[in-house]
Image (cartoon, rainbow, N blue to C red):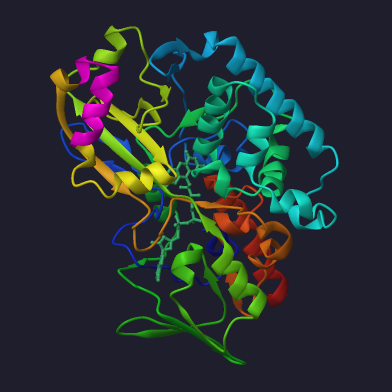
Amino acid sequence: MLLARKGFDVKLFEARGRPGGRLHTSDEGEGALYEAGGEWIDSDHFRIIDLLKEFGMEPEGRPTWPRRVVFRGKTTTEDELWNDALEDDLRVEAAARELCRDLVNPAWLNKNHGDLDRRTLGDFLREHTQSDAGLWWVTSNYRSDEGDDPDRIGLLGWLTGYMHYLERDGDVMSAYRVPGGFRSLCEKMLGSITVAPYFGAVLQKVSQDDSGVWLHFERSKERVDHVVLTLPPPALERVVFEPALDVTKRCAIEACGMSRAIKICWQFDKDWWHEEGWGGSMHCDGPLQQTWDGSLGEAPILTAYVCGEQAADWIKLGDPVKAGLYELTQICPQASEHFARGWWHDWISDRYALGAFSHLAPGYVLEHMEYASTPESRIHFAGEHTATWIGFIEGALESAERVVAEIEKTES
Ligand SMILES: Cc1cc2nc3c(=O)[nH]c(=O)nc-3n(C[C@H](O)[C@H](O)[C@H](O)COP(=O)(O)OP(=O)(O)OC[C@H]3O[C@@H](n4cnc5c(N)ncnc54)[C@H](O)[C@@H]3O)c2cc1C
């Protein structure tokens, strides 16, 4: 869209039969509408907020009910968190702030912090917590942000992401959603340009010579002056490049961590949770990990968001919707009585994503991160994994701005 607005002649190729990629508003009919992929917008994700406003869409505020917290059979709410967990939470935050003082962005410039790059977030959380409840609470929160277990996340990468949060005032995380879902935004974006996308076009090979770039699909090929590849790293790994990409780029693609996350969504005949005085949001120490009210249409829907090893375990089950409902009913007995139907979305096996979003694995920042975004002549790399807002929708938009500037520079 940005390139078309700058007057470039643009073609769009997409493997799936729909726009949006990892933004996927699922419409199951009869008012059952929910986000199967990316959903929440932090209040300082200004690019996405501005984009919505540009299309006349007002971001919808998160419901204000406090989250329910369930640990070892005890239940409380986030605003009345157990003291030991709260103290550990504050301890972790203070330690992270202290370490951030010495760091700079972009992350790979912190060459003298190899020790932090080799360490894991999990190790750091264990060091700065003193109670079981506290360790579980911080693990649960940061696993949800990172989309995978803290033992898979590099500390330096996490800290440089955390630097975005230092200036934050109040609770800005997951502040908004898109009314009607991201589907409506994607449709509006497509409608604003005169380009007809080629859906079902699976890129298999990219070759380039002095005259330009050839894109090879199953039954056709196209010549272009530049190509912007937004494929997630595991999907990029499947594309053949001729000549081969630089070794630094190949290593950056291969080493980029992809978080393991799934969503399970249940539709009910009524929003029984509101009758209980609960908004539907919960962190629990059982296999469901986290839930929230996922309804975007009239049908009442609860969404469970499960990350890491537990997500990998869920996808081995025959029927995660039913098994998940059983788990939910253990905590909320009303659930099974009002259950109507459900769906689940496995992003780990999704062939065009092979993971939910990227994270910075131990050792990645100093060895590989800077090479994820570098262009290879007329081949440009975009997508959340190439941005400083790594993992977020905001990162995908940030990367779009960067590649437009790259292409303009080469063409001028
Ligand atoms: C379950 C889940 C929850 C999330 N929650 C949030 C959230 O709350 N907030 C947030 O900010 N972010 C969230 N995210 C992350 C967010 O959705 C992504 O960071 C963002 O959408 C990525 O955009 P992208 O353009 O980089 O990649 P994509 O959207 O993946 O775009 C890449 C495109 O390339 C296509 N493609 C792949 N292979 C090929 C090929 N061979 N040929 C042609 N096309 C191909 C794909 O189909 C896709 O359309 C979540 C993601 C998931 C999965």
Instruction: Say which quarter of the image contains residue 60.
Output: top left
How far across and down, in percent of the image, does residue 327 sit? 27, 27
Q: How many labels does the image show?
A: 0
Report the residue at 46% width, 23% height from top: 62
Q: Which of 131 and 201 is in front in this view?
A: 131
Q: In this view, does 334 lie to the left or right of 42?
A: left
Residue lying furthest bottom? 210
User: Is most of the magenta stretch helix, strand or loop?
Assistant: helix
Q: Can residue 106 be seen in this view?
A: no
Q: Is residue 116 left or right of residue 361?
A: right
Q: In this view, does 294 lie to the left or right of 237?
A: left
101 magenta-colored: no
How far across and down, in percent of the image, does residue 6 sit? 60, 63
How far across and down, in percent of the image, does residue 263 sit? 34, 40
Instruction: Say which quarter of the image contains residue 295.
Output: top left
Instruction: Say which quarter of the image contains residue 366.
Output: bottom right
Q: Is residue 297 above or below residue 153?
A: above
Q: Is residue 340 above or below residue 397?
A: above
> On the rendering, which quadrant does ligand 1 occupy?
bottom left
How far across and down, in percent of the image, does residue 102 sit? 86, 42
Q: In which quarter of the image is the C terminus?
A: bottom right
Q: Is residue 213 above or below residue 356?
A: below
Report the residue at 66% width, 59% height from top: 364
Magenta stretch in the rendered image:
322-335
Q: Nearer the viewer, residue 246 or 28?
A: 246
323 magenta-colored: yes
Q: Is residue 42 above or below residue 378?
A: above
